[in-house]
Image (spheres, rainbow, N blue to C red):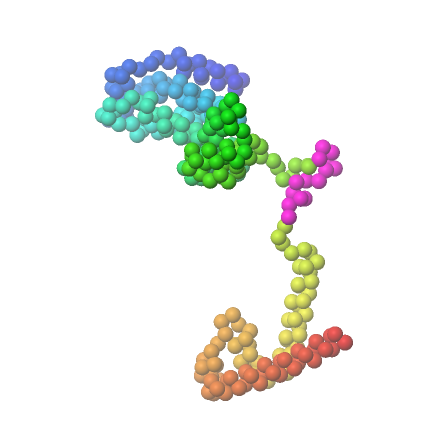
Amino acid sequence: MQDSAGRSMINAAMAAPYLDREEEHDLAVRWKDDHDQDALHRITVAHMRLVISVAARFRHFGLSMGDLIQEGYVGLLEAAARFEPEREVRFSTYATWWIRASMQDYILRNWSIVRGGTSSAQKALFFNLRRLRAKLAQGGEMKAGAALYRKISSELGVSEADVALMDSRLSNPDSSLNAPVGDDGAGSADRMDFLVSDAPLPDEVVGEAIDVERRSNWLHKALDVLNDRERQIIARRRLQDDGATLEALGESLGISKERVRQIESRAMEKLRLALVRENTAFLA
């Protein structure tokens, strides 16, 4: 049903009458100046064969011909909206760029789930690699490999690594990480099972959590050996992300900053001894 509709659309486009230069100019002026919808319709209908012709050039990317034609029609409408008839350029010449650009953008968005062609150089590589590779390898003059990639990189102004990567992408379709590796179906391992993770192993995560909890308990027990002033100074100086200054603590406690330093030094020594005792008891 869909193929029949597509063929009917193509046949209708091919049967549409051509526009001579004078008629085309008149229709373009009517559309630009008066927004005459009938003029726009006649321009687009007369140039649908151009859309189909451009779409045929991209059929090897494996996308629906109907979808490519629809995207090309969007480009055709964009060209009609921007066309300036006073420049005395044929509409087909101007529209071809917009039609091709619209189709290329659609292909880049839908050919693979991995987005490519994010720069003009990468886009040129994507759409010209097959053609250049076939041209250079014609007659056995240059086989696939470093020499071919070097020549293509020079032609398109991209690195050899980019050429090799794009060649690999174009040669292999997308593969799901959940697809089985073997032919055993449900009994086979998935590709996902062979990915290397940088995350810590489960036993390392558990061990770290236990160590953190143990150290936290030791610290809380050690803090009990401090008096209120010592605990307050250690908490504000050592146990906060932005530790308070000696001067700020001195003003808060009504003592000199040198006295704060002395109390802090004594408290740190008391904590050290308490932690040594706790560790000794734990190891024993």
- Residue 64 visible in the shown view: no
Say which residue appears at 46% left-offset and 87% top-offset: 256
Please state which of residues 216 and 143 is positioned toward the viewer in this rendering.
Answer: 143
Residue 188, picture quadrant:
top right
Which image quarter: residue 17? top left
Measuring from the top left, give residue 189's x and y in whole percent. 71, 40
In this picture, is 90 found above or below 277?
Answer: above
Location of residue 271 with respect to 150 vertically, above or below: below
The answer to which of 252 and 68 lies nearer the viewer is 68
User: Which of the two residues, 198 or 7, is positioned nearer the viewer here?
Assistant: 198
Among the 4 quarters of the image, the one containing residue 179: top right
The number of discs equals 0
Q: Residue at x 31, y 29 (%)?
A: 81
- Name the spot of residue 229 as percent of width and height, x first: 55, 84
Magenta stretch holds residue 108: no
Is 183 contained in the magenta span? yes
Span shown in magenta: 182-196
